[in-house]
Amino acid sequence: MKMKKLNKTNIQSIIDTVYPNIKADYGLAKIYGFPKVEIHRNIYEMASGIEGMMGEDNAQANYCRHSNTIQLFQTEIKDAKHVIQCLLHEYRHYLQSATWFKRYYAMGYEYTNHPYELAAKEEEKNWKKYAELLGESK
């Protein structure tokens, strides 16, 4: 797969191609409709509302349960493979229990060993199936 920096239009095109298939394959969570997908420059700009806001540790993507939205952060997206991996990772979070997500952290799990994070990371391995829809598989 080519390693070129993607702009918002490129990212949206990938989403438009693969996301309907991800939704069809993984289905609906019990209490939510399908999540929307938004593209933001970075998490700091999104959270602050200040154009050009930067920070030290930028997120690649996020699932916001409150708004039922998968948020992708353009400055951290590497390529089409990465877009797909982020969608799969955050879609897995959408399907997971919010109660247990918090409970695991309360039990002492951290990001690196949290069972839901590990499951979401594992889900990223399924990216090739969706890359084929783009005509890319390597």
Image (cartoon, rainbow, N blue to C red):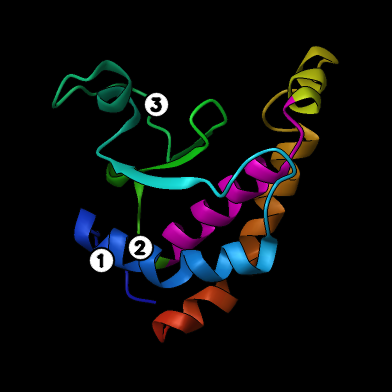
Q: Secondary structure at mark 3?
A: loop
Magenta span dominant secondary structure: helix
Q: Magenta part of the protein: which range?
A: 81-98
**According to the image, label 2 marks what residue?**
79
Q: Is residue 26 left or right of residue 6?
A: right
Numbered mark located on residue 4 in the image: 1
C-alpha gap between disc 3 and disc 2: 19 Å
As shown in the figure, which amino acid type bears the numbered disc 2? Asp
**According to the image, label 3 marks what residue?**
57
Q: Is residue 71 left or right of residue 25?
A: left
Q: Position of residue 32 (x, y in %)?
A: 63, 40
* Label 2: how many Cα within 10 Å (few below 14, some 14–19, many 20+): some
Q: Residue at x 62, y 68 (%)?
A: 24
* Picture quadrant where residue 65 is located: top right
* Picture quadrant where residue 79 is located: bottom left
> Foreground: 116 or 111?
116
Please report contact status of discs 3 and 2: CB closer than 8 Å, yes or no. Answer: no
Q: Residue at x 44, y 59 (%)?
A: 82
Q: Is residue 125 left or right of residue 106?
A: left
* Label 3: how many Cα within 10 Å (few below 14, some 14–19, many 20+): few
Q: Position of residue 77 (x, y in %)?
A: 35, 51
Q: Is residue 9 left or right of residue 131?
A: left
Task: Indicate whether residue 118 is drawn in magenta.
Answer: no
